[in-house]
Amino acid sequence: MRSSNPVFSRRGFSRDNGYAGFNTAPQAGYAQGNPYAQNPYAQNPYAQADLQYGAPPQAPVTTDRMTMDDVVVRSAMTLGTVALGAVLAWALLPVSTTSYGLAVGSAIVAFVLAMIQSFKRTPSPALILGYAAFEGVFLGVISEMYNSRWSGAPFQAVLGTMAVAGATLLVYKAGWIRVTARYARMGLAIAMAFMVVMAVNLLLVAFGVAENGGLRSFGPLGALVGIVAILIGAFFLTLDFKQIEDGIAYGAPRNESWLAAFGLTMTLVWIYVEMLRLVAIFTNND
């Protein structure tokens, strides 16, 4: 199963040097059409020794395998870099045409770095942290812009993003959401349809066919679209959680934790930007 997150969608964690990527990991509910359903550890080279004893695979004992601590530490570093870039941009770049230009430029650089990393076979901490820094500058400028018009909107958006991430993790760990192949297909189809509609809307706005942002207006329709976008972000998170969980279970290389951090950061940035717009819409309608 692959996430729509660019980091995960191309290949998931690597299979280089004999490591098992979790795109072949067994998933709950895959009995239909799953050739490994009768032997769920068939594609995991680390499970073979355990299968002869009829036991599930054990946690890796070597230090070159990814652990949850690795993912947490790398995610904290990446998100911390985003936060630092945002704070510095907010403090040093006053709201102006120049700062808007820098925000756009930073967003473009962040996008380029993200695409380069997405097509690399191995994670590059420098690229990932560079992406985080430029993304932080972009977020800092637009957050200051929103705050200048809707005071407190960035703080509320941060709280909202944390709430969405926490709630998504809670329902995932509680088993209320089962990340199955059907779930992934349906969710990705909805996400792709959403992106196509947003691209068409952008073109209509650019050519003056749709006014006031079209579907992205600051009215009830814009609020509905924002809620859908946040739900799609939460869907991305469930795929990321599952892939990270499987990567740890099947002994992905330790440096792959950088990819996990990168993917989570991109998803959380998506949710924050949409939450920022949503807060502004509700504040605007008060």
Image: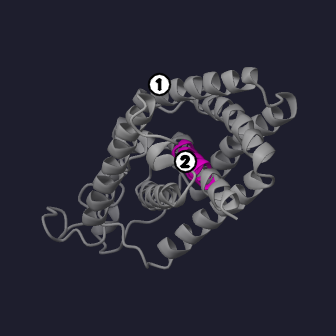
Q: Residues within 10 Å of mark 2 (few under 14, many from 20)?
A: some
Please tell me which residue lies in front, 67 or 117.
117
Which residue bears the numbered disc 2?
Answer: 270
In the picture, the quarter occupied by the C terminus is bottom right
Per the image, the residue denoted by label 1 is 116
Residue 12 sits in which quadrant? top left
Instruction: Report the side of 83 relative to 2 (left or right).
Output: right
Confirm whether the magenta stretch covers residue 286: no
Q: Nearer the viewer, residue 205 or 62?
A: 205
User: Label 2's element?
Assistant: helix
Tell me the kind of residue under disc 2.
Answer: Trp
Residues in magenta, as a range: 260-275
Q: Nearer the viewer, residue 50 or 67?
A: 67
Which colour assignment does the render follow?
Answer: one colour
Quadrant occupied by the N terminus: bottom left
Cα–Cα gap, marks 2 and 1: 19 Å
Q: Amino acid at mark 1?
A: Ile
Decide which of tag 2 and tag 1 comes sooner along the chain. Answer: 1
The residue shown at (37%, 72%) is: 178
Q: Position of residue 230 (x, y in %)?
A: 51, 58
At mark 1, the secondary structure is helix
Q: Position of residue 66 (x, y in %)?
A: 53, 50
Q: Residue at x 23, y 59 (%)?
A: 42
How far across and down, in percent of the image, does residue 74 sit?
Answer: 64, 45
Mark 1 neighbour class, 10 Å CA radius: few under 14, some 14 to 19, many 20 or more? few
